[in-house]
Image (cartoon, rainbow, N blue to C red):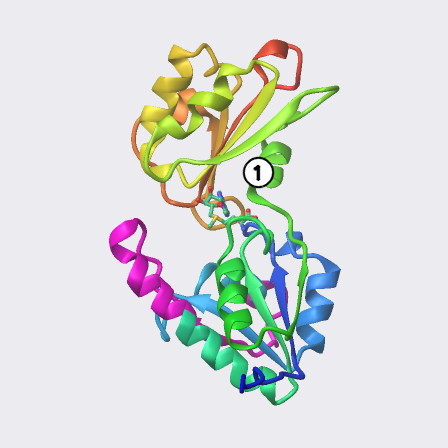
Amino acid sequence: MATAAPQSGGRLLGVGVGPGDPELVTRQALRVVAESDRVVAPSTAVDAVGRAEAIVRQASPELHMERLVFDMTAGGDGRGAREASHRAAAQALVRWLDDGEQVAFVTLGDPNIYSTFSSLTAAVRGLRPTVEIGSVPGIMAFQALAARAGAVLLDGTESLSLVTALDGPEALDAAIEDPTRAVVVYKGGRHVPEIAASLSRAGRLEGAVMGELLGLPGERTGPLAQLADGPATYLATVIVPPGARRGQGQQP
Ligand SMILES: C[S@@+](CC[C@H](N)C(=O)[O-])C[C@H]1O[C@@H](n2cnc3c(N)ncnc32)[C@H](O)[C@@H]1O
């Protein structure tokens, strides 16, 4: 006879807290964390303050948060450790959810775009398939960069590709072939010089902007051509505007 999966009366909410500037944390995010029974933030160690926790600390200094430790090792080698940390985090969450708690998981930017929240929810659903899971949208780094750089990202019938370049600039190749497409590059900080060289070869470097550590200490924003003299940090975003309207939009 099949055993029924345990039920959970709690609710898990992924709460996007924006890219860094505490003023970009939405009122809804602040309300939801204030109303939740427990607020948890991802971290690389129990004694390390993660980005999302730091942002919420500034936006809501009186709020108590707990840390869930995640292995952030990138690439295939770290996969096993990453998955094990997601399972351990899910087990901790399930204990609270089974007690009927509303748990808010704060995360950088938006919780549904390249976020630990999606792997975490998959692990939680593996343990409690019917648990209620929701999210609160957050402002994303590329929106903050477009505003900071005065760059119109899309207009008319132009389209957008959001790519990740953790492993190198090849990730941009298909997207930059289409001149009507704007391209946003995430996770490419380590490869910034190669990304700039690739855009230059494709005739797409002009107008491209980079924002590093947006809203955080050490922020740098400016034309990619001027900032590509070495690797940036992991928290770097590049916007390549559509090539077809080069020279017509706002320039940083
Ligand atoms: C794991 S993804 C997180 C994306 C996030 N969920 C979002 O909605 O923007 C991490 C990437 O987001 C971008 N990013 C996030 N915060 C940033 C910031 N403060 N400054 C620049 N880029 C940032 C970088 O490209 C970084 O490599």
Dot 1 amino acid type: Phe
Q: Which residue is rendered at x = 39% and y = 66% of the image?
A: 70
Residue depicted at 64% across the width and 34% down the height: 147
Q: Secondary structure at mark 1?
A: helix
Q: Is residue 101 visible to us here? A: yes
**Residue at 32% over, 37% down:** 167
Tell me if residue 69 is in the magenta stretch: yes
Image x and y of residue 84, in percent: 35, 69
Q: Which residue is nearer to you in this view: 223 or 239?
A: 239
Describe residue 211's horizontal placement relative to residue 59 as left or right: left
Location of residue 207 in the rendering, given as x and y in whole percent from the top left corner = 53, 18
Task: Tell me the quarter of the image containing the C terminus.
Answer: top right
248 sits left or right of 196 in the view? right
Which residue, given by chain and number where applicable, does mark 1 sit on?
Answer: 142
Give the residues in magenta: 57-86
Q: Is residue 223 above or below residue 246?
A: below
